[in-house]
Amino acid sequence: MTDRNDVPPLTAPAGKPAPLLPPDSHRDRPLFVVAAILVFLACLSAIGARGAWTASDSWTADLRGAMTLQIRPQEGRDASADAARAADIAAGLTGVASATARDRDASEALLEPWLGGDLPDDIPVPLLVDIRLRSGAEPPVAELTEALSAEGVTADIDDHARWIDAVSRTTRLARLLALGLLALIVGAAAAVIAFAARASLAARKDVADALHLVGAEDSYIAALFERRFFMLGVKAGAAGAFFAAAILVLVVFGGGSGTENFLPALAIHPIEFIALLAAPLLAGLVASLSARLAVADDLRSRW
């Protein structure tokens, strides 16, 4: 008769002791797909939020560091000469780095999307003077207005203040939306993992009951589910981050032209790589924490 102590333990195919919670590909595959999709969306939301941040800083910096003069054509005056004189006056003011007078062709190029090209020569087109400020300098609006009036040059001065406010409000809203979407996706992922962990505990009720009978604490049983869902989260996070990286590469290197000035700037920088490389670990931590809390709460109400 064989002694019970001589009975070999249950082993896995590799010769190691079989895990108390063996993988269940039939149940885990749909959860893996859902988790990978959520990680993919979370990565895109994070990259989009950073793009909004970068675009906001770039746009506001460009607007704060520039001014625009609009020289209106007047009867009896040479608009081109007035634009050139205005540029010379602006270039001599404190805080101005450069001032460049634009010709009629430049103004028509700006109007072409709305009025079409080849405007008749008798149509008065305002000329622009592009003024670049030194770093940290305030727009010398009062000084420029006084100097132009002294020269008899009629011009509209735009210090871009209203555009700065509009851009700041828009990009602030884009940031909040991106971060809110990211938080919503993380919450949805945590809820899905918690539901799956409870379902997994219900499917392995006999294992949990047996462990409880031999003296295993709830923390030990919860840790089994925690480790299992951590690995699932890491694998799903790696898949989701991979597809997010692929989309980022396609957008950066294959994006359509003409949208660079209107969409958040996306680029491949080390911070993007760091975020995508950290996504699997973060997904695993969210999955393991959600599973542990859900299983621990279920176990407390069970015994």
Image: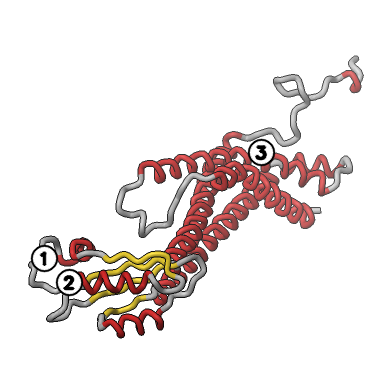
Position of residue 178 relative to residue 201, above or below, is below
State the residue in front, 72 or 7.
Answer: 72
- Disc with the residue nearer the chain's start (2 vs 1): 1
Q: Mark 2 points at which residue?
A: 125
Quarter of the figure with residue 264: bottom left
Q: Where is residue 181 in the image (x, y as percent from the top left)?
A: 52, 60
Q: Which of marks 1 and 3 is nearer the N terminus?
A: 1
Q: Do the residues labelled 2 and 1 touch (CB within 8 Å)?
A: yes
Give left or right: position of 50 versus 155: right
Rendering coords of residue 234 (x, y %) = 63, 40
Going by the numbered disc 2, the residue's amino acid type is Val
- Name the side, left or right, on which 219 lies relative to 64: right
> What residue is shown with label 3?
231
N-terminal of the pair, mark 2 or mark 3, is: 2
Secondary element at tag 3? helix
* Residue that appears at 31% across and 49% down: 257
Q: For the point 10% across and 61% down, which residue is it?
A: 118
Q: Quadrant of residue 148?
A: bottom left
